[in-house]
Amino acid sequence: MQNVIEVQHLSKSFGNHEVLKDIDFSVNKGEVVCIIGSSGSGKSTLLRCINLLEKPSGGQIIYHGENILDEKHDIHAYRKKLGMVFQQFNLFNNHNVLSNCMVGQVKVIKRSKEDAEKVALKYLKVVGMDQYVNAKPKQLSGGQKQRVAIARALSMEPDVMLFDEPTSALDPEMVGEVLKVMKELAGTGLTMLIVTHEMEFAKEVADRVVFMDKGVIAEEGTPEQIFNNPKEDRTKAFLKRTLS
């Protein structure tokens, strides 16, 4: 297995509050890893540290064998390799759907407009939003916005896709359409790191499940191990609360 990202002894504090404590884990090429845990357990902060939206307080993030927290490392080059899908979509409201999926390609990875449009249309088709190219975000439902946000991230053709609770801001009837797209992506061999509270989805799609509690990784394993045979009492307590 080839490690794409390896996190070693990662810590993150906000003032005196230690949110992440000595985190060690890795994501292999083509692997789908789901991170689960209660609110406030550090899941989203871990994701934000991995893509450097937050600066870790300590430890290393190794990407293809290099510590990206080294002073000499080109953070922008690294960030281009990560696709990020947020809870709140973060679409550009003044751009239409097609333009939302082109702007990063043109500005950040310097693709020509023609190439950017081809790539954007390809991924809008993947998420089932190709018939909405001229719509503005305000004309779309939450589920449609999130599917455009996924297409926008895919249009950058990243090495790894990061999802931060991509369904938590959606009405219940829209959750399914976004999870369906993510399931299909998982089947394509894309490397995915997903913070989620959708347990059935994690059970079905993940190669590996990481359970976080109070800023540490309390347990990790296959979905089978974590959901059917957890070892740690706190994993059992969390699943009992969540699944009942």
Image: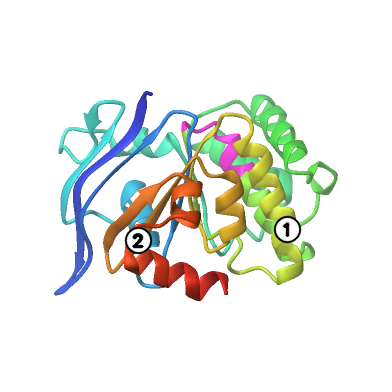
- Where residue 70 sits, quadrant-wise, is top left
Report the Cα–Cα distance between label 1 and label 2. 25 Å
Residue at disc 2, secondary structure:
strand
| Type of the residue with mark 2 | Met
Q: What colouring method underlies this structural image? A: rainbow
Judging depth in this view, the residue of 93 and 185 nearest the camera is: 185
Along the horizontal axis of the image, is 182 left or right of 206?
Answer: right
Q: Which residue is mark 2?
A: 212
State the image coordinates of residue 5 (x, y, percent, origin top left): 33, 35
Above or below 191: residue 92: below
**Residue 39, position as x, y percentages in the image:** 42, 72
Magenta residue span: 151-159
* Nearer mark to the viewer, of 1 and 2: 2
Q: Which one is nearer the viewer's eye here, 185 or 38?
A: 38
Structural crowding at the residue carrying mark 2, measured as other residues with C-alpha within 10 Å and reported as few (<14), some (14–19) or many (≥20): many
Q: Which residue is under mark 1? A: 176
Residue drawn where x is 77% and y is 37% of the image? 125
In the rendered image, the residue lying farthest to the right is: 131
Residue 75 visible from this viewpoint: yes
Can residue 157 be found in the magenta stretch?
yes
Q: Amino acid at mark 1?
A: Gly
List x then y, in percent, for residue 187.
64, 34
- Residue at the (67%, 52%) spot, across then down: 179
Q: How many marks?
A: 2
Q: Quadrant of the C terminus?
A: bottom right
Task: Give the residue at x 61% y 62%.
Answer: 167
